[in-house]
Image (cartoon, rainbow, N blue to C red):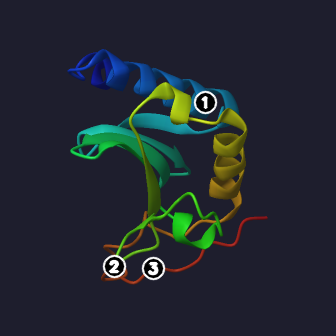
Amino acid sequence: MNYIENLSEEKEKAIGHQLAHLMDTHLTFTESKIWHAHPVWFINGNPIVGFSKQKSGIRFMFWSGADFDEPALNVRGEKFKDASIFFNSVSEIHPEEVKRWLKKAETIQWDYKNIVKRKGVLERLKIV
């Protein structure tokens, strides 16, 4: 993934590769693409998870993560339902924890795909 290769530090690249691997392994049915300049994984056009480089480290963000009831996802968005965690080394990434979060990302989703059409109002998607 070009985004990862363009990160400046080797530790950032390692984190990016690890996160991408975990998402590609556990979200095989999703579409991944660069969206708003960083990698994002989608289910039926709805963004569910992505990561980006920020001053505090690599931000691993779940669009609907505020409803996951996961204390480690402690960086909460103020306006929407997102939650994230920052990683500064691969050793901070716990694959079983990430796998659990990814499973929740499949089943707990707010409809970001249609947020513009709904004038900024989020609706919970019913996942069958």
Residue occupied by mark 3: 122
**Mark 2 packing: few (<14 Cα in 10 Å), some, or many (20+)?**
few
What residue type is disc 3 on? Leu
Residue occupied by mark 2: 79
Q: Is there any visible trace of residue 1 in the rendered image?
A: no
Q: Is there any visible trace of residue 2 in the rendered image?
A: yes
Helix, strand or loop status at disc 1: helix
Mark earlier in primary sequence (3, 2): 2
Q: CA distance from mark 1 to mark 3?
A: 28 Å
Give the image location of residue 123, x and y in percent: 52, 80
Q: At 37% across and 81% down in the image, what residue appears?
A: 118
Is 71 displayed left or right of 54 in the figure?
right
Quadrant for residue 120, please give it.
Answer: bottom left
Mark earlier in primary sequence (1, 3): 1
Image position of 48 with respect to 5: above or below: below
Q: CA distance from mark 3 to mark 2?
A: 10 Å
**Mark 1 packing: few (<14 Cα in 10 Å), some, or many (20+)?**
some
Q: At 65% across and 37% down in the image, what residue appears?
A: 27
Give the numbered dot on residue 12.
none
Residue occupied by mark 1: 22
What residue type is disc 1 on? Leu
Helix, strand or loop status at disc 2: loop
What quarter of the picture does the C terminus occupy? bottom right
Give the image location of residue 108, x and y in percent: 65, 65
What quarter of the picture does the N terminus occupy? top left
Give the image location of residue 25, x and y in percent: 66, 27
**Mark 3 packing: few (<14 Cα in 10 Å), some, or many (20+)?**
some
Give the label, 1 or 3, closer to the camera.
Answer: 1
